[in-house]
Image (cartoon, grey):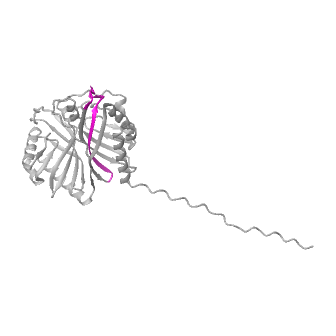
Amino acid sequence: MQPQVPPPQPPVTATAEPPPAPPPAPKPKLSDLISESMQTALGALNAHDATKFASVYAENAEITVPGLNDVAGRAGVLANMNEWFQTFSKVKLGFSRVWMKDKVVVLEWVIQGTHSGEFFGVKGKDNPIGHAGLSIVTFNDDGKVQSEHRYGDLGTVASQLGLTKEKVAPIPALPETTDVQQSKPEADAKSEALAKGALAAFEKKNPADLDAVTQEDVEYQGLLTSSSVKGRADLKKTFGTFFKAFPDAKMEPALVLGVSDYAIVEYQLKGTQQGALGPIKATKKPVSLHAVDIMQFKDGKVSRVWTFRNSAELMQQLGLFQVPVVVPGAAAKAGGTTKAPPPKKK
């Protein structure tokens, strides 16, 4: 018998290795995330979508508004915006200027609306309102809003609704375009230095010291006057009047941010009204105000200054405008309220 030949072995084949996992998608640039959040917030506000608006804020975000209660957390932002939309219908907002530097964005905006709900205890009669404001917004690494310092002029709104004796301010038009200023390191540093020089001149309380830091045709519309002042001579008169009213005035800067040929100066101004300030007679009362000056520079000197603040903050402290005291409750805990907090004891 012939020995049987074993059948041939099947060829050995290599086991195919699984394809490598695709690399993770690159994380979008922070600047792109910030721009997306800004556009989302703007669209949501104009669509009256409080939930979508709150979505661009971090879970532990905080909004501070001079003269009003702070808003804490995304839930607080949601509650605040729901209340705002109940108080003011037909709300529209647009950005007139934007300054961008790293994680900080400064937004100059104009808002319009109709007073339909309850504002400072007054029921709405569909009166139109509108004013300019400013927000200093800091974003986190995910492009979410971590903090916002919001300067909306509720004193102007109160005058438009006939709640004060102040001259009624006209409602500004919504901006058609947005002027965007991007950070330029060398220019930023120069603008910050010039701003600090202007602050030092203010601290000396001598109007003559303004000559060295301002252009001859400087424009000023700020905390010290309700009307626009043009020219160094009139500016010095304005400052002279203010220093007579508040001889102990002290400016405490919280932020000096240079962005290109501009500086954003956020500060607290403290003083005691010892003399008349326009139609307001001396009250002998101490005041503490929060404001932001936007300084624009040309050829190494201040060419223009304009200010954002809540004028109701000053009016309350001087006894010119009284608002209901907040009663602690759900709205206050959530951060949503259009009522002013009780005055702090000195």
Residue 306 visible in this rendered orientation of the protein: yes
* Image height of 95 relative to 342, above or below: below
Residue 51 forms part of the magenta stretch: no
- Front in this rendered view, residue 343 or 141: 141
Provide residue 183's location: percent of width, then percent of height.
28, 56
Numbered-mark total: 0
Side (left or right) of 239 relative to 135 = left
Q: On the image, which quarter does residue 8 sit in? A: bottom right
Side (left or right) of 159 relative to 58 = left
Q: Main secondary structure of the magenta part?
A: strand
Q: Quadrant of the C terminus?
A: top left
Q: State the residue at coordinates (39%, 55%).
A: 29
Q: Which residues are magenta?
A: 102-127
* Image height of 305 relative to 131, above or below: below
* Image height of 110 relative to 329, above or below: below
Provide residue 320's location: percent of width, then percent of height.
17, 30
Residue 118 forms part of the magenta stretch: yes
Which residue appears farthest toward the right when viewing the image? 1
Provide residue 197's location: percent of width, then percent of height.
16, 53
Q: State the residue at coordinates (10%, 54%).
A: 212
- Front in this rendered view, residue 290 or 28: 28
- Front in this rendered view, residue 144 or 227: 227
